[in-house]
Image (cartoon, rainbow, N blue to C red):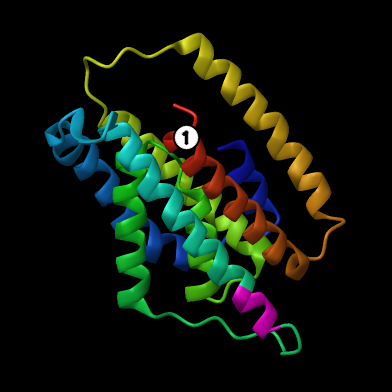
Amino acid sequence: MVGSISYFQKGLVNIKTAIVFGIPSIIAVFLTRVFILPAIPNELFNVGDFTVTKSILLMLIFAVLMIFASISMIKKTEELVDEMPQKQQFNYPLIILEGSVVGVLTGLVGAGGGFLIIPALVLLSKLPMKEAIGTSLVIIAAKSLIGFIGESSETVIDWLFLIKVTSFAIVGIFIGMGLSKRINGEKLKPTFGWFVMIMGIYIIVKETMLK
């Protein structure tokens, strides 16, 4: 929330994109947390001695999508290196579909979805990298709030852990905003793409080999 306000003040939030992408995403998060997630059994199937649980499957799906998103960003960046910046385009059906898919994944995995939102905004809406980051923060803040509201009343929340994580996140946001002033937006695309790919591979290894 702190980061999104700061990006608002700097004019790095695209309101139209936040609405077109955010509304279906927020609706999908709420419906997923209330109806879909509780209906999935905790243990799904076995592969030899390895039991695939709901949490493992969801994390693997999330990781695979992260890798595909990262490849798209890296490839797109290489193709457009020598081209002039493109005017923003709105493929409404595709953006709405992407928002809904990211919303479902956010609701299932419980993550903010930034790894998928930023590539979607850069590739589908043609937003500059820094503007995509600011817009994604607004969408993530709204989705996280709706997902929290839709959480089961029986869920135990570790408030102390939540406060600690939030505090570190706020510090990281301010550090990131400071660094962004010194880094060219176009150079952030491949860097972010490779980072997302590494994280996706790490999640797959962690969930399958390090259990």
State whether the magenta stretch is mostly helix, strand or loop: helix
Q: Residues within 10 Å of mark 1 (few under 14, many from 20)?
A: few
In the image, residue 197 lies at what x, y percent?
58, 55
Magenta segment includes 79:
yes
Image quadrant holding the C terminus, namely top left
Q: Residue at x 59, y 85 (%)?
A: 87
Between 111 and 64, the one nearer to me in the picture? 64
Q: 162 and 79: which one is in front?
A: 79
Tell whether position 28 is magenta.
Answer: no
Residue 13, given in percent of the width and then of the height, sits at: 58, 59
Say left or right for 168 vs 28: right
Residue lying at 55% horizontally and 57% vertically, measured from the top left: 135
Q: Is residue 15 visible?
A: no
According to the picture, the residue beneath numbered tag 1 turns out to be 209
Depth check: 181 or 49 in front?
A: 49
* Extreme residue in the front direction: 48
- Taking the spot 66% from the left edge, 58% from the top edge, the residue there is 194
Which segment is the magenta one?
75-80
Q: Quadrant of residue 85?
A: bottom right
How many labels were placed on the picture? 1
**Could you say where residue 160 lies in the image, as x and y percent from the top left?**
52, 9
* Residue 2 visible, this orientation: yes
**Residue in the image at 45% along x and 60% along y:** 18
Describe residue 206's horizontal placement relative to residue 150 as left or right: right
| 188 versus 4 height, above or below | below
Q: Report the residue that reaches farthest toward the right.
A: 182
Could you tell me which secondary element the residue under label 1 belongs to?
loop
Instruction: Quadrant for the N terminus, please.
Output: top right
Image coords of residue 77 (percent x, y): 66, 76
| Callout 1 amino acid | Met
